[in-house]
Image (cartoon, rainbow, N blue to C red):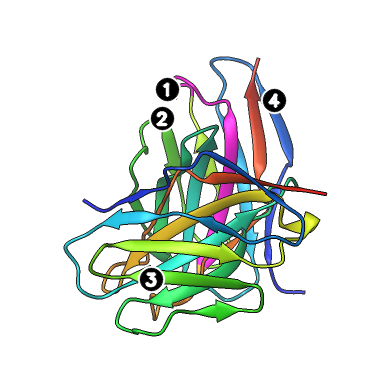
Amino acid sequence: AQTVTQSQPEMSVQEAETVTLSCTYDTSESNYYLFWYKQPPSRQMILVIRQEAYKQQNATENRFSVNFQKAAKSFSLKISDSQLGDTAMYFCAFIKSNTGNQFYFGTGTSLTVIP
Amino acid sequence: DGGITQSPKYLFRKEGQNVTLSCEQNLNHDAMYWYRQDPGQGLRLIYYSQIVNDFQKGDIAEGYSVSREKKESFPLTVTSAQKNPTAFYLCASTIRRTSLNEQFFGPGTRLTVL
């Protein structure tokens, strides 16, 4: 079975500072995909960033970047220059490459950006 | 505008009643999903469908039923057999052909059992 663990239920960061959200996963697969989703107070789920496991290079999307450590099965999200609009729940998600697109989600980290 | 719509946004049900949550997408996506979201538990998969007239149980299918008669529609029925149905329900869809594609989510339905 695949599991995704987010060990930080809540975090806070000062505006303009940098914060890192942790995610670990457990799988016996060699090829898979990882995602970070954001759920703001509106509860609309929004994709933040994605990573293909076979790619060594860490994905980056503007202020968001990941630290993907395949051997350690770790996939952390770094948010630079935090903004008030980054306040949200963040979910880490995993999908195997050869399945019917079944996603496995972590329990989420609630991030608050403090002005 | 392409996207996923869920209706209603808020739904109240009396105990013992069945209720159906609507999910429609105009993205021409093959696969559709229903998730349940409870505080502290993240998203749990209820049912998913990869093609019309076919669907599979997820991790918490008991007390729920679905149908997929049209590609764009994937309604979820919460039956009276579901012991604790009060939750936030999210519908999602994705192109099936490659796993790299993200899941697109609807705005959700908040179901409350009175």
Secondary structure under tag 3 reads strand
Furthest-left residue in this view: A28
Left or right relative to B17: residue B63: left
Furthest-right residue in this view: A115
Mark with earlier residue (4, 2): 4
Q: Nearer the viewer, mark 3 or mark 1?
A: 3
Q: Position of residue A91 (x, y in %)?
A: 51, 53
Magenta span: B80-93
Mark with earlier residue (1, 4): 4
Mark identifier at residue B63:
2
Q: Chain of mark 4?
A: B
Mark identifier at residue B43:
none
Respond whether the residues carrying marks 3 and 2 are from the same subunit.
Answer: no
Residue drawn 52% across the image and 44% down it: B76
- Label 1 CA crowd tier, 10 Å (few <14, some 14–19, many 20+): some
In space, the residues marked 3 and 2 are separated at their CA atoms by 38 Å
Mark with earlier residue (2, 1): 2
Disc 4 and disc 2 in contact, CB within 8 angstroms: no
Asked if residue B68 can be seen in this view, the reply is no
- Residue identifier under label 1: B81
